[in-house]
Image (tube, coloured by chain):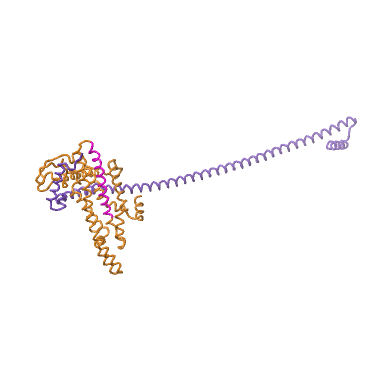
Chain colours: A purple, B orange
Amino acid sequence: MFNPFAPEIVHAAAEAAATVQTEESVLGALGVNWKLFIAQLLNFSVVLFIMWKWVYTPLLKIIDARTAKIDKGLKDAEAAAAAKSGAEQASEEAILAARKEAQRLIEEAQKAAEAQRAELKAKTQAELAALVQQGKDTLAAEKERMVQGARAEIAELAVLIAGKALGEKLTDAQKKGLLDAAAKRIDS
Amino acid sequence: MTIPPIAAEPIFHIGSFPITNSLINAWLAVAVFAVIAYLVKRSLTSGAPGRFQSAVEGLIEFMLGYVDQVTNDRAKSKKFLPLVGTLFLFILVCNWMGVMPGVGSLWRTIELHGHIENAPIFRPANADLNLTLAMALLTVITSHLVGIITIGFFAHWNKFIALGTFFKSLRKKPMDIVVALVEMLVGVIEFFAEIAKVVSLSLRLFGNIFAGEVLITVMYALVAYGVPLPFTFLELIVGTVQATVFAMLALVYLTILSEKPHGHEEEHREDELGEAHGLGDEHRLAPQGANAS
């Protein structure tokens, strides 16, 4: 175990005490020596100067510059993001407007086509109706003509038959009277 | 076994200049920093940082975050970081180099105070009061220079020799004159507090590292294998803690002396608040959050 009263320790303590007694001042007893003090002051000053010159000053400058750069970058990115979202919105709006316009155009075209078709249909129908009417008219006229013809023929035949049946020749005046009477009967 | 003496032993002399074992260690630490700083400087690029640069940047940002917590002001933090960060890193490297194999165990026979004895060639740099005193003095003097530059020569010294406050009080009520006289007395105390800062900073670091070296030496002398391990590990922690404490106190001193006195009546109360917490009040925390984001 450690014995504080071991001869070596006692000797060392006595030596230390002797040292203290031989030195003049308290500082001297503690080992302060102006030559060494200046040397050590110089040592620390050298370290301080080196660190200040080579490490702290340039590094702090670099760190500050980088912080400023990052701040600027972040702001730029924010602005870019805002611009992008603005552009996106604008393009979306444009697309929406274009889509609406297209829809409108399509509807218009459809309406126009519808109208045209209706017009065409109406025109065709009118033409058809006119044609039909014309045909009907022609048919009616033909029929009329045929009826007239037939009537005349029938009357003539009737008169002829009546004449034959009667066995006598009719006068023109009698023929005419008969024809008119026959015609009147057919008509009625 | 020889317990290391309080003063670092001169291993050899150049003329009348003693090259002590602690000085050798300090030079090694300076060399380490010179090499690393040169590598950093050479690898720096403002574009995408490499792994090495990222690591260094991470360390700097980490320290800057800590400094921000005390100063609450990014611009101030950037001004203080070179000194505070270097104090932290240099003390840390010196302390950790002190537990490397060979430190305290490689010997050279020298003549000291008329005795022939074996002195270790390497001794932790901070186990020499010269170095810790140099750093403490530099810190405190710098904090006063910072105070003079940021709040003005007279405003700064008025904290210690409150003549300005006294002359202003002459035009006011008698009670103000009494307060001014009390402030002059407090100024004297503040003046001694500045000396106490140097003494406490330097002796705290020196004492811890020197005691650690003695502890390790004793442990190795008792049982060379296994037993000293936890103590060596402890020294790593002590080294970190002491580096942090020194740097933090330096930062607090710098911050306090660079703050404007808020209306002369509340000046000392405010200073004490700042010293007690190492932080400002809540309303000064708010803009810091805004700065950090």
Up/down of B32 relative to B270, above or below: above
Q: Is residue B236 magenta?
A: yes
Q: Nearer the viewer, residue A136 or B69?
A: B69
Q: Nearer the viewer, residue A108 or A42?
A: A42
In the image, is A79 to the left or to the right of A171? left
Number of labelled discs? 0
Viewport quadrant of the C terminus of chain A: top right
- Which x, y percent locates residue B290? 36, 52
Q: Give the residue displayed 69% in from the left and 38% down from the top.
A: A131
- Which x, y percent locates residue B100? 21, 40
Viewport quadrant of the N terminus of chain A: top left
Q: Is residue B31 visible?
A: no
Q: Nearer the viewer, residue A136 or B178?
A: B178
Q: Give the residue displayed 73% in from the left and 37% down from the top.
A: A136
Up/down of B22 relative to B285, above or below: above
- Which x, y percent locates residue B135? 21, 50
In the image, is A12 to the left or to the right of B42? left
In the image, is B233 to the left or to the right of A134? left
- Which x, y percent locates residue A7? 14, 42
Main secondary structure of the magenta stretch: helix
Q: Give the residue displayed 49% in from the left and 43% down from the top.
A: A95
Q: Is residue B149 magenta?
A: no
Q: Is residue B178 visible?
A: yes
Magenta segment, which residues?
Answer: B226-255
In the image, is A76 to the left or to the right of B160? right
Q: Nearer the viewer, residue B15 or B173?
A: B173
